[in-house]
Image (tube, rainbow, N blue to C red):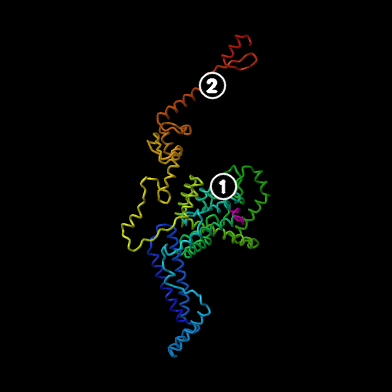
Amino acid sequence: MILEEQRFLHEDLERLEQGISDRVGEDPRHVRERLNRDHQIAGFLDRIQDQSKRLLDIYKDADGSRSKEIQSISTGEPLEAFYKQLSEIRSFHQRYPNEPVENLERAYKKRTPGEGETGTSEIDNMFTGEEAFGRFFDLTTIHELYLNLPNIKRLSYLQYLDTFDVFTPPQCTIKRPDKMTDQYFTYVGQLANYMESFMRRTRPLEDLEKIFKSFDEDFDKAWSANDVPGWKLDAEPTSAPSNDVVWCADCEKEFNNENVYKGHLTGKKHLRAAEARAARQGEANGNTQSSRPVSNTLRLKERAIAERENRVRRLAAAMSQERSDTRVNVERKQGMTERERQMELDALFAETPSAAPQAGDSDSDSDDEEKIYNPLKLPLAWDGKPIPFWLYKLHGLGVEFECEICGNYVYMGRRAFDKHFNEARHIYGLKCLGITNTTLFREITGIDDALKLWDKIQREKKKDKVDEGSVVQMEDAEGNVMPEKVYYDLQKQGLL
């Protein structure tokens, strides 16, 4: 049956190529459909490689079984071999009467939603709701790990998105000795694993192994040349300390008081930092034999951490578009309520891929499907479709608010109107009128009203302001100081 297996593998390869060709010709509109198509094609390519290896092994015929089968068919009685194989097939189906038969034509054919296509389930469990099928990063868990690191500057999630791939000062406040802890090693390892996993999930058709191999080769060259940022074999300070302070090269810290500097020399933290610096210098100079085992072990740990930092840096540079989109998405969600965020998440997962147009459909039908029916001119949501009318009425988006200070700009809805008082357009309009204290002018949209209120505030300030130089002070015989008017009143009453 080796020839039958050979024929089956050839048919399987042709069916796989046809399945890939059918899917490559598609142009999915939704990101979920596109990712589902790419993952299906990647699975087909992996199966082609496996089947090709099996087929090559058959053609190599290491044990000679294929040659024996060909010889038995060509030299023996043809009908005898045929009936022998027929009896084997019948006996097999007698033992397994309910054995399903694999239909290659249907296995790789693209099914329409009406035929029960369930291909989208392949990627439904790959991404979290925050990732939105590979459009954004979800670094909330990694951000919590970062906040739990010792001696770090606390950053918000937005600030962390801008600096998570920066591991050198001054942006990174984590010093080199603090990076040698197991906690930091776990943090940078999980960050590198997440970035690599995200790229594998969002780019299944790219040769990622080649990309990762190039990352490792570039890192090996930089490490051998002692050119990895933040991990060079020199412990000298990057900037010379001033004459008024005492610099500790081991701790990389300045001290304003010499007594404090001398007191910290006996601390455990300084001793550990001095030992680590001595080990690095021993590795760089190579003239001390006693510190060689310690320095080698320390250098290996530094290399492991530096390799993960380098991978995070390269992966973040390769996915810069997703990173910028994540920042915009986080800023947008910060201005939404919890209910709005939940509604957006439900709509994302509830959206079903649209059915593929039939071959007999005309071009006019496809054009009509692309047009959005919006007779009420409702605002568009994040998915490009009009928002519901009840949501339009709930937020009062039909009410117009005009602001003369902003150049007669019209704001739709109370929420947008209240928000614009803190925006640059309104603040710039107030500054053009000479108004500096903008916090007192909320709910004021007219230029005349703003100028009148500003003049009133200025007059009250001048009225309340007391000129110390214009007040005449008088002193009595006991040395009590008082204003001139009070002094003469007391004198008239005979109290002085």
User: Magenta region, mostly helix, strand or loop?
Assistant: helix
Asked if residue 264 is among those painted magenta in the image, a careful observer would answer no
Q: Residues within 10 Å of mark 2 (few under 14, many from 20)?
A: few
Query: Residue 440: horizontal and vertical position, in percent?
Result: 48, 32
Q: In which quadrant is the C terminus drawn?
A: top right
Query: Where residue 4 sits in the image (x, y, percent)?
Result: 45, 80
Q: Earlier in the sequence, mark 1 or mark 2?
A: 1
Distance from disc 1 to disc 2, alpha carbons, whole Å, reads 47 Å
Q: Which percent across, then down, holds residue 18?
A: 39, 70
Amino acid type of the residue tagged 2 in the rendering: Glu
Residue type at mark 1?
A: Arg
Q: Residue 468: which numbered mark, if any?
A: 2
Q: Is residue 35 left or right of residue 186?
A: left
Residue at the image position 37 percent from the left and 48 percent from the top: 374
* Image: magenta residue range: 176-183
Residue 154 bears which disc, if any? 1
Q: Secondary structure at mark 2?
A: helix
Disc 1 packing (10 Å; few <14; some 14–19; many ≥20): few
Q: Residue at x 40, y 60 (%)?
A: 355
